[in-house]
């Protein structure tokens, strides 16, 4: 019984192991029977591909669309087309296989045509490195085709070619290297010396500004502004201004009425007739002005010719006025003399002559 039980266990072990082997073979080889046509794609990378292995995923905007099939130098595959076979290998050729089913139900030819159009619009291949795990993947996405144009290859690719662009980490490292190179080339001690001189000049300038005087002037200016502000507030709050503001609608109404009245007067036919009459009168002003000038000229000549006679007449009038004033003063003092007064004394001609 013990021997039969041992054979049974051994046979059960063999059967289970055989079933596991057959299942493993079926699972591992299932892709052979379910294999679909893929699209081969090539790219060349001018930077290090450390961490990138065959079988690494190829992603488009984070979605896996294929895998890396082979990594080698471009000269190894296109040695016959290389112009200088003795040169050191520089470009790394990365061959990929893309699954059309990951995009949409497309055939291989349709996917090639679509990818060719996408390349013209800026589709590029980039390396994507994980800082934690160090695993490198292929990331396909759009960039500016003007910044990263397609390279001119000395050979003709046998498969669909998608140009590459530097990875973000490589761009950061290149920028840091350029910055360090510029810092090394810069004259740091001289720059520090200039900064020290600038600080000293600034200190001298601040000391020469006489901060206390400037502060006093600023305070005085602020006080004047405050006084002006108070004066303006008093003006704005004055009763006269409020009354003027209250009378503003009435004044505006009167102005509107006056404007309407002026407009009515201007459009009156009598005003138009008056203006037309003024126009005709204006045309006669010229001859009338000439006549007046001639009359004034004749008066000037007459006055000039009778100058002496006019002076004698003026002097006589003045004497007559003086005598009349004296007579009037005398009558004011002795009014009875005009009626009761005796005649003046008789005088002889000889006595008068003497």
Image (cartoon, grey):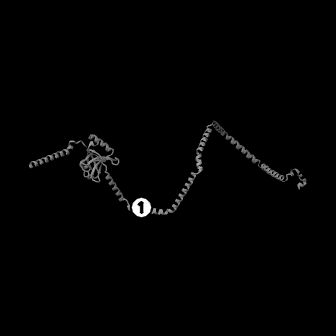
Tag 1 residue: 195
Location of the C terminus (image quadrant): bottom right
Residue name at image x 58 percent, y 49 percent: 242
Residue name at image x 44 percent, y 62 percent: 199
Q: Position of residue 331 (x, y in %)?
A: 84, 52
Q: Position of residue 47 (x, y in %)?
A: 29, 52
Residue 124 visible in this rendered orientation of the protein: no
Q: Secondary structure at mark 1?
A: helix
As drawn, is 166 to the left or to the right of 11?
right
Q: Nearer the viewer, residue 207 or 293?
A: 207
Residue name at image x 72 percent, y 43 percent: 295
Q: Quadrant of residue 34?
A: top left
Q: Quadrant of residue 116?
A: top left
Q: Position of residue 173 (x, y in %)?
A: 32, 54
Q: Position of residue 155 (x, y in %)?
A: 27, 46
As drawn, is 340 to the left or to the right of 103?
right
């Amino acid at each position: 019984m013990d021997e039969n039980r041992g054979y049974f266990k051994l046979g059960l072990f063999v059967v289970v192991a055989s079933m596991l082997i057959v299942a493993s073979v079926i699972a591992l080889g299932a892709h052979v029977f379910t294999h679909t046509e893929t699209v081969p794609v090539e790219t060349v990378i001018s930077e290090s591909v450390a961490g990138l292995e065959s079988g690494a995923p190829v992603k488009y905007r984070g979605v896996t669309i294929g895998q890396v099939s082979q990594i080698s130098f471009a000269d190894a595959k296109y040695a016959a087309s290389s112009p200088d076979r003795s040169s050191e290998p520089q470009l790394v050729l990365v061959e990929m296989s893309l699954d059309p089913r990951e995009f949409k139900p497309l055939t291989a030819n349709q996917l090639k045509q679509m990818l060719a159009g996408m390349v013209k619009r800026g589709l590029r291949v980039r390396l994507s490195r994980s800082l934690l795990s160090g695993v490198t993947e292929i990331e396909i996405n759009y960039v500016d085709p003007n910044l990263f144009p397609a390279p001119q290859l000395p050979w003709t690719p046998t498969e669909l070619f998608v140009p590459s662009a530097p990875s973000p980490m490589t761009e950061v490292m290149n920028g840091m290297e350029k910055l360090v190179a510029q810092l090394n080339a810069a004259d740091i001690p001289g720059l520090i010396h200039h900064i020290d001189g600038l600080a000293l000049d600034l200190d001298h300038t601040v000391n020469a500004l006489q901060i206390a005087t400037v502060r006093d002037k600023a305070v005085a200016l602020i006080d004047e502004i405050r006084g002006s502000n108070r004066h303006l507030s008093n003006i704005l709050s004055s009763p006269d201004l409020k009354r003027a503001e209250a009378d503003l609608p009435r004044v505006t109404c009167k102005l509107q009425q006056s404007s309407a009245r002026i407009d009515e007067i201007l459009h009156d036919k009598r005003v138009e007739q008056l203006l037309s009459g003024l126009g005709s009168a204006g045309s006669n002003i010229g001859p009338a002005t000439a006549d007046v000038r001639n009359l004034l000229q004749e008066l000037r000549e007459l006055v000039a010719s009778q100058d002496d006679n006019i002076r004698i007449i003026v002097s006589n009038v003045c004497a007559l006025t003086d005598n009349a004033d004296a007579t009037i003063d005398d009558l004011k003092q002795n009014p009875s003399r005009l009626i009761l007064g005796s005649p003046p004394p008789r005088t002889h001609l000889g006595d008068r002559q003497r």
